Amino acid sequence: MVPRDKMVSRAYEIADVIMAQHRTIRRLTTQVCRRNWKQRIVDDLDMTFGSEMFGDFCNTKMLHSYLDSSDLYDLKKK
């Protein structure tokens, strides 16, 4: 833990230590650091894509099965 005003300089210190290592060590360190966000993309991509498509369907005048999407919504409300 470092104070907020020293955070960037500490990050550069850590980067200098990493960059002084052998190329293989740098590559492995990069993979370890990127693992969390890459795994989140893999885990959430299908749900996110499905949500976007559902939102697009509900908010446009796209025809589906000869019904306007707003008509489908109105049918479900009845």
Image (cartoon, rainbow, N blue to C red):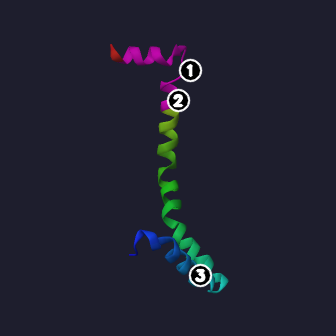
Q: Which residue is mark 1?
A: 62
Say if the magenta span includes residue 67.
Answer: yes
Q: Residues within 10 Å of mark 1 (few under 14, many from 20)?
A: some
**Three-letter code for the amino acid on which mark 3 is drawn:** Asp
State the residue at coordinates (45%, 70%): 5
- Magenta segment range? 55-76
Q: Earlier in the sequence, mark 3 or mark 1?
A: 3
Q: Is disc 2 in contact with disc 1, using a CB cutoff of under 8 Å?
A: yes
The quarter of the rendered structure image containing the C terminus is top left
Mark 2 against mark 3, which lies toward the viewer? 3
**Three-letter code for the amino acid on which mark 2 is drawn:** Asp
| C-alpha separation, residue under disc 2 versus residue under disc 1 | 9 Å
Q: Is residue 1 left or right of residue 65?
A: left
- Residue 54 horizontal/vertical position (percent): 48, 32
The quarter of the rendered structure image containing the N terminus is bottom left
State the residue at coordinates (54%, 80%): 13
Question: Quick one: 5 or 47, which is closer to the camera?
Answer: 5
Name the image quarter holding residue 62: top right
Q: Which residue is mark 3?
A: 16
State the residue at coordinates (47%, 54%): 43
| C-alpha separation, residue under disc 2 versus residue under disc 3 | 46 Å
Q: Which mark is residue 56?
A: 2
Say if the magenta span includes residue 68.
Answer: yes
